[in-house]
Image (cartoon, rainbow, N blue to C red):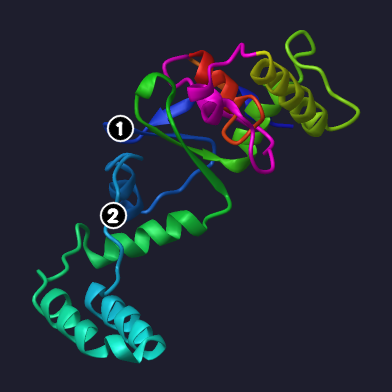
Amino acid sequence: MHDWAQTAPIQVSNSVFIVGNVALERDELNILEYGLNSIPSKMLSMKNQLKADLELTADRYPELQMSLGLIRDSIVYNSDPFSLNMHRPQYKSLNNLKQRNDIVVKQADKGQGIVVMSREVYEAKTYALLEDKESYEELSENPMWTTYETIRDEIKDLIKTGSIPKEYVSRIRLRGRPKLPMFYILPKVHKKLCPGRPIVSGIGHSTEKPSKFLD
């Protein structure tokens, strides 16, 4: 049986690595070379969208039809033409990448490029970390709500006793439903067998706002 956790990276371009059994079309590779921070223009007609929004508003408020007509003429019909920052075949390749369930695309650890991993390799390297009993413990139940209630009550006590200045209360008080932290890995392509660097994203978790406040 293949030990996917020990799979080494292969560099296929200046900035793209593959790990595992990954096949990429030339256009897909070109898209990845833009980097994960590249933002493609949306393929839409701004003119048609604005026109539809204004017409909907005019239907709801007939008394504004004349004013909305002037706005439409000045904004919609005199606006600069919408331009794409990629060619149409590239948009197709981007959508193909988004729809592929057999791969996982991640930024390399230390920002050394883009890594495309087969899903089985990504999962194997992730589980290899989680199986380290000295670093991780499997829980019998989800502690999310218990943690939320504990932090919420502690914050309330701190606010009540004046330990937190009033101007900071809105920055630290918990609101809305908490979310589970997300565990993922960043592949270390600079190391021989490309181990994963564990990352826990706590966006939306009960500890997010207190952590930002303390920083």
Which is more toward the observer, 144 or 86?
144
Amino acid under disc 1 = Ser
Task: Assess disc 2: are there few (<14), some (14-19) or many (≥20) residues with their C-alpha within 10 Å of its C-alpha.
Answer: few
Q: Position of residue 164 (x, y in %)?
A: 58, 15
Amino acid under disc 2 = Pro
23 shown above or below 77? above
Asked if residue 10 can be seen in this view, the reply is: yes
Which is more toward the observer, 106 or 176?
176
| Residue 189 colored in magenta in the image | yes
Q: Quadrant of residue 82?
A: bottom left
Say what secondary structure mark 2 lies in: loop
Residue occupying image coordinates x 64% and y 24% = 207
Q: Position of residue 84 (x, y in %)?
A: 20, 63
Residue occupying image coordinates x 77% and y 8% = 134
Q: Is residue 37 left or right of residue 121?
A: left
36 shown above or below 191? below
| Residue position for label 2 | 40
| Residue position for label 1 | 15
How far is mark 1 from mark 2, CA to CA? Answer: 19 Å
Comparing labels 1 and 2, the label whose residue is closer to the camera: 2
Q: Tell me the magenta residue range.
A: 162-191
Asked if residue 199 can be seen in this view, the reply is: no
Question: Total number of numbered labels?
Answer: 2
Residue occupying image coordinates x 54% and y 36% = 20
Q: Position of residue 35 (x, y in %)?
A: 31, 39
Which is more toward the observer, 134 or 190?
134
Q: Is residue 131 left or right of residue 123?
A: right
